[in-house]
Image (cartoon, rainbow, N blue to C red):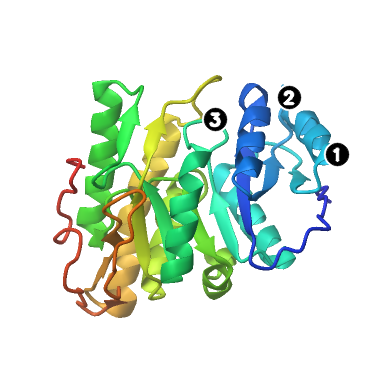
Amino acid sequence: MPKVRTTPIAAQDRALVILPTFNEKPNLEALVLAIRGEGCDVLVVDDNSPDGTGELADRLAGSDPGVLVEHRAGKLGLGTAHIAGLKRGTELGYALLVTMDADGSHQPRHLGPILAAARRTGGVVIGSRYVSGGSIVGWNARRKLLSHSANLYVRTILGIRVHDCTSGYRCYPRRVIERVDLDRIICDGYAFLIELLYRCLKAGVPVTEVPIRFQDRIAGTSKVSSTEITKALKLVPRLRWQRATHHGREVVSAEPEIELHGSTALPSVQAGDGAVTPGSATGDGGSGPAGS
């Protein structure tokens, strides 16, 4: 059984940041402290990291009741780690569940605007690199091209009007997770991010993008492999085929936040047979402001 430390702090109306970890010891402590400084609780989901990440997480939890730890038996994958964290956060009654990379690429200072957008819209909020105000630091041209191409591919095949479909920096209200059957998720790894976003849109959940400054990992090595990329590429046509089989042709969309600290009035977002709301961020599979 996974080890989970529960917190005495009332979870109602609070936000829980879920950090899936595997060999992230050099980054973990500073990241956890920064997240706690933003007023959020933290759940570390560690896949039995051989570098001692899990032990460090336990020490942090021992001195702070707002830090929780779940230990898993081995490297079971990013998707299942997210699912484990989302389910645990739902069980504990947190109002907002945030997923964030533990490598330092997602900055806690963006939590405020992301949480504010989630509370305002009641839907999923994506920390986006590819809307106006978003940026990427530390990537070479090849990696940027790969990311832009992957997002264009997803938008084109699925008709998703979301600029950053592969961002793992997201906020899900608990009621959204309760509507989406996580047990039906078929993909693990980074393909999981695409599938869960698609399922949320299919369920009629509004999706908003808030610009972030994405910083390449501070320490350690990237977990993204060619195998993970291949899985994601294979998933997209499969999801489209399921859509065509069960619901016919439809377009799902999202509205971007224009300013990081501004207040933007958002029209309602719909998902349905050909439904496109006025003022959508892009056309069907179109490019975003950052050229994704």
Residue 192 visible in the displayed image: no
Which residue is disc 2 drawn over?
A: 50
State the residue position of label 1. 62
Considering the numbered disc 1 on the image, is that residue within a helix, a strand or a loop?
Answer: helix
Task: Residue lying at the far front in this picture: please name it.
Answer: 262
Q: Nearer the viewer, mark 1 or mark 2?
A: 1
What numbered label is drawn on residue 118?
none
N-terminal label among 3 and 1: 1
Q: What amino acid is found at the position of numbered circle 3 in the picture?
A: Asp
The x and y percentages for residue 46 are 70, 38
Residue 22 visible to an observer of this rendering: yes
Q: Amino acid at mark 2?
A: Pro
Find the distance from the CA under tag 3 to the CA under tag 1. Answer: 22 Å
Give the mark, 3 or 2, whose residue is nearer the N terminus. 2
The mark closer to the camera, 3 or 2, is 3
Whether residue 197 is situated above or below residue 112 in the rendered picture: below
Where residue 153 appears, x then y in whole percent? 23, 48
Q: Is residue 224 left or right of residue 281?
A: right
Residue at horizontal 24 percent and vertical 54 percent from the top: 155
